[in-house]
Amino acid sequence: MEQILYRYNPWWEEEYMPASFLERKHIFGNLKNTLETRQVVILTGLRRVGKTTLMKQLINHLIGDQGIDPKLVFYVSLDDYLLTGSTIIEIIEEYRKINRVSFSEKVYLFLDEVTHQKDFELQLKNIYDQQNAKVYVSSSSASILKSKKSFLTGRNVVMEVLPLDFEEYLNFKGIKTKKSDKQLLEKYFEDFMQTGGMPEYVLTGDVEYLKELIDDVIQKDIAAFYGVKDVQILKDFFLLLMERSGKICSINKIAKILDISPDSARRYLQMFADAYLIFLVPRFGKTNERLLSAKKIYAADLGMRVYFTGFRDKGSLFENYVYLKIKKCNPSYVYQDGFEIDFLTQGKTLIEVKYNAQMGEKQKELFDKIEVKKKIVIENIFDLEKIDKLEK
């Protein structure tokens, strides 16, 4: 095990050379702010969305900027098959032995893909309660948030890592524009809607990378994780979800198309949501309406959606992007009298998205009559600033 841990932590024996990363200022700033807290920080999100990179950037910050002794910083990926059979506690004990770190010394532990470990919550609780450690963990499965066990209650904070937004996309592409360059910005935004925000794909443009990523998520984070034997059914299911992105999802219709039971379709749908490939938005209303009404589906990444559907229906892609921008506000959709309003946030802001278009008369009547704190219509990329500081 010692050789494996040295491989993960080259800063223990080499002169520290910080890795070069393109920084995501907002989320990295939030991550740095957690350094002074006691809580276990859980980074969640789609596979390869940048969780590991954020961990490595924080390691850079600790060693390079804060002058923390490199031997007090430990990183490991717990999905490494060479570590199978070793518990988190045993791995950390081995780390302490290697570097002769006493239990009284504060250490910084970065545990990637923690859900690959059995009883990870209990082990994290023991580390939190018994060791002088600041712990960061990551997971590509939402199961870490849905566990009915309560070991980490009050001991953790969750940070969801989403694909790059438009501003981050421009930064990754090295594009600088002025607000006066309206037409140029609109063209770049359409490029962004076509590419999406998966960091590596933005940098390389390699379509094979995107295909392999989707296959990886379906095979490792869904089929293997949940024991689904028919991987082709999952791939066909995901194609249907991408074609219906931005629309209300009928479980019965999907089940009929794929010739599976509605119960199986419902389970598969939740698996895709738990793997962060899609997001499900409930209908606004009383508890029964929220639970029983069909959900709207949004793709986690625009590039993945375009890969399956082609670059069409820009209005729907734009709506999908707006959803990703306001996801933190827990939006629902509104459906009344046969008409739909895109979003009503938890903070009571009503939002309708019309990409270079306008509402129809009946929809406008519904929009006007709903009583809320605030109403926003988003018709182009310059309207996006209206949602930048929405209350949760």
Image (tube, rainbow, N blue to C red):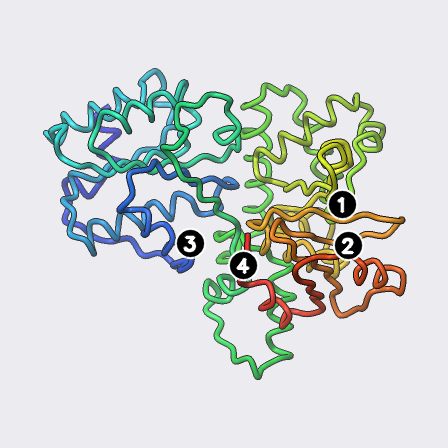
Residue at the disc numbered 1? 243
Q: Residue at x 60, y 43 (%)?
A: 211
Q: CA distance from mark 3 to mark 1?
A: 30 Å
Label 4 or label 3, whichever lies nearer to me, is 3
Give neighbour class at mark 4: few <14, some 14-19, many 20+ (Cα, 10 Å).
Answer: some
| Label 1 secondary element | helix
User: Whole-Å distance between the Cαs marked 2 and 1?
Assistant: 20 Å
Can you identify the residue that label 4 sits on? 165
Q: Earlier in the sequence, mark 2 or mark 4?
A: 4
Tell me if mark 3 has few (under 14), some (14-19) or many (20+) residues whose alpha carbon lies within 10 angstroms of its own: some
Residue 212 % position (x, y): 56, 40
Inspect this view and state whether residue 53 appears. yes
Q: CA distance from mark 3 to mark 2?
A: 30 Å
Query: Which of 22/365 is in front?
Result: 365
Q: Give the residue at mark 2.
A: 341
Q: Nearer the viewer, mark 2 or mark 1?
A: 2
Q: Earlier in the sequence, mark 4 or mark 1?
A: 4
- Nearest to N terminus: mark 4 or mark 3: 3
Q: What amino acid type should be assigned to the residue bearing mark 1?
A: Glu
- Sequence-earlier tag: 2 or 1: 1
Estimate the spatial distance between the alpha carbons at disc 2 and disc 4, rounded to whole Å: 23 Å
Asked whether the beta carbons under mark 3 and mark 1 sit within 8 Å of each other, the answer is: no
Q: Residue at x 55, y 41 (%)?
A: 213
Residue 103 picture location, percent across and down = 14, 28
In the visual, does 384 lie left or right of 132? right
Relative height, residue 386 to residue 184 (above, below): above
The residue that label 3 is drawn on is 27
Label 2 crowd bin: few (<14), some (14–19), many (20+), radius 10 Å: some
Of discs 3 and 2, which sits in the foreground? 2
